[in-house]
Amino acid sequence: MKSADHFEFDDLQGLLRFSHGHLTETCFMLLNVSNSIAAKQWLKAASITNASSVHPLPETAVQIAFSVAGLRILGLNERLIEQFSDEFIVGMAGDESRSRRLGDIAANDPKNWQWGGDAQQVPHVLLLLYTKDGLMKNFRRHLEDKNFHQAFQLHSVLPTLDIGLIEPFGFADGISQPKIDWTDKQSTDIHEREGYSNTVAIGEVVLGYPNEYGEYTNRPLVNPKLQPNSEKLKTAYDDVSLKDLGRNGSYLVVRQLNQDVPGFWQYLHKQSYSDTDKRNELAASMVGRQRNGDPLITSRVQSTHNAAEDKNDFTYEQDLQGHQCPFGAHIRRANPRTGDFPHGVTGFFNRLIKILGFGLNKPDDDLIAATRFHRLLRRGRSYGSFISPEDAIKANDSDEERGLQFMCLVANITRQFEFVQNAWMISSKFNGAHQESDPLLGHREPLLSGEPSNEFSRPMASGSRQTVCNLPQFVTLRGGAYFFMPGLSAIQYIASLPSNKDDLS
Ligand code: HEM
């Protein structure tokens, strides 16, 4: 059913299995549906890339995702819409308290965004095109046929540019990703695990399968008696009387994060009194890795004899004081790794006591508990031309826009993306911190209590703390939205929906 050889890779969009890293040209289009009948015809005929081809990998790829407005305009009835998660329905910019929790305030406020800031006007469709170098122009000509133009109106093309396997500040990117347990080998019972695992249950990223709780995430299920065209959908694994619109689908979080690259390097240069080694050391401590991707944690668990995997083969268990990698470093906040197996705790009962939240050393220990419920499958691409730290230090303007089209795929937006962004990245209390948030992403606004959030500290082996103050904002949000990336059968179901007026509810 869902074991190695039998997983429905032919029904899964390729991006859930591959990052399409070998396809260096990209075109990410935000579209509005101008004619829903034409749009459904286009969808019926579209070759959306599935996840089945490993050898050879595809030369081009097309992936598609819909906002809630997009699903509505294509005719999905409200009874099904309301079975999607609340945050998807309300939208990333749809309520002020969400914006506050995500750190989308001040310069990041949705009212300043270039797209997606008005939750009522979120583009209907996100079409992601990938090709090998030099093929995009022809590929687009072929794909954007007469029917396409009748069906869709281009809202905008999100900027992207391949600068290699790095992000615009110049650090190696795309190293750490959760491995999806396609073979269903790993038990979701925590007591059967030896330690931190980078492998997560399919249901953490793909809907319609058990997640790390061993449960199915809520998703739209269709009653075939009420929806005769639903025979195109797969039968739900957890209720054979229902068809599963969510199966092989995932939520796609998109945030256009503008990076002030000159501002970043100029600040570090000044803080380091123009000493290049000190500057690079401070930069690495903010990220948690050297620019070439080497982790700051030197005590690795084991060698996998695979260079890429070796860079990711560590936990923070040997660095409880944060002397090697500061607690506030971007990657330590983004994935604290050892939370499921609290430091130094051995034996079933002791572990259980900790997991249940008793016997915490510090009141903040629980903030990093259970990392396996908060993993993100990152699929972003960068934009803007590469500028070296040396040139960035000399640059006297930051006219050129550079940044990340941050994208991640998750089965539960609140429990995964929003939790990581709020409780780990933005939180000024993360892991016992004070007055600081993520050194790369923080908005630097004071808290409601008036306490600042613009510092970054490094615990030193001597017992002291080295703190840098007045961090400027390096990353500013330019746009964002939540999308749903359906499985291929679900796309065909959507394409066959009757138009709204004679909809069956
Ligand atoms: C412009 C903004 C950002 C920059 C420059 C950036 C940069 C980086 C870099 C250099 C790495 C290390 C390379 C790797 O492990 O792949 C990394 C890892 C990571 N980032 Fe970001 N990132 C940004 C935004 C975000 C956001 C918004 C999130 C989530 C809310 C996020 C989540 C992660 C995660 C989960 C990891 C892997 C951590 C681990 O497993 O060790 N990043 N990022």
Image (spheres, rainbow, N blue to C red):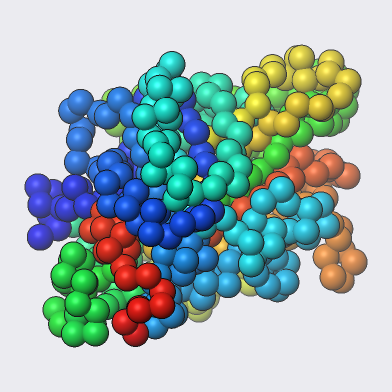
User: Would you say residue 468 is visible in this rendering?
Assistant: yes
Residue 439 or residue 218, whichever sits in front? 218
State whether residue 345 is above or below residue 17.
below
Q: How many marks?
A: 0
- For image coordinates 73% across by 67% down, the residue present is 100
State whether residue 437 is above or below residue 439.
below
Q: Position of residue 81 (x, y in %)?
A: 43, 75
Q: Quadrant of residue 51?
A: top left
- For image coordinates 69% across by 62% down, the residue present is 118
Q: Position of residue 238 (x, y in %)?
A: 20, 77
Q: Position of residue 255 (x, y in %)?
A: 60, 49
Position of the C terminus by quadrant: bottom left
Residue 227 or residue 353, whichever sits in front? 227
- For image coordinates 41% across by 64% down, the residue present is 74
State whether residue 492 is above or below residue 72.
above
Q: Position of residue 320 (x, y in %)?
A: 56, 51
Position of the N terminus by quadrant: bottom left
- For image coordinates 18% across by 57% down, the residue present is 184
User: Would you say residue 340 is visible in this rendering?
Assistant: no
Q: Is 448 placed left or right of 404 in the picture?
A: right
Residue 6 or residue 416, whichever sits in front? 6
Q: Is 31 placed left or right of 502 in the picture?
A: right
Q: Quadrant of residue 111?
A: bottom right
Q: Is 338 placed left or right of 12 in the picture?
A: right
Residue 325 or residue 347, whichever sits in front? 325
